[in-house]
Amino acid sequence: MPPEEYAETALRATAFACVYFTGADDRPLQLHSVYSHAYPWQLVGGTMDIGDRPYETAVRECQEETGLTAPGPPRLLATAYGLLGAQWPHSTIGMVFDGVRLTAGQIRGIAPRPEGARPVPCTCPRTSGNP
């Protein structure tokens, strides 16, 4: 089968990469999204651009969204896969890279982006069953 023909049958997916930061209390840092009502809390990261390697995306998005520099070298913690659905026409696949433990001052220093895309840094509240 020619490559062009095979490509028409292959999975189409949106790829993303993010950095998993924690606060001093070891809870994950998430940013509030004003553009996604289905997923209002998200890790620091974003959609990969064509030609990007996953860690390049994580570093770029981290700098854009928080002003922080993602630590290196990259250490992959997890991958995530989502099936296509009513809210998005493609499957999603993402890579989660290890961040660092941020101080309270570093978290307070995360400023909202001018366009308001992710304005509220917040550590997840503890829920029953979580340490």
Image (tube, rainbow, N blue to C red):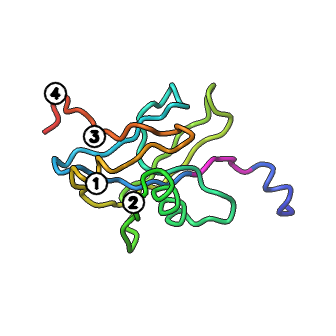
In which image quadrant can residue 115 be found?
top right
Where disc 1 sits, the SS reads: helix
Taking the spot 57% from the left edge, 44% from the top edge, the residue there is 92
State the residue position of label 3.
Answer: 123
Whichever of callouts 1 and 3 sits on the residue coming sooner in the sequence is 1
Local secondary structure at mark 4: loop
**Would residue 117 be found to the left or right of residue 6 on screen?**
left
Position of residue 131 relative to residue 23, above or below, is above
Residue that appears at 39% across and 37% down: 120
Distance of label 2 from label 3 (alpha carbons): 16 Å
Mark number displayed over residue 128: 4
Tag in front: 1 or 4: 1
Which residue is at the front of the view, 131 or 59? 59
The amino acid type found where label 2 is placed reads: Leu
Where residue 64 sits in the image (x, y, percent)?
51, 55
For marks 1 and 3, give the one nearer the viewer.
Answer: 1
Q: Which residues are magenta?
A: 10-15
Labels 1 & 3 near each other (Cβ < 8 A): no
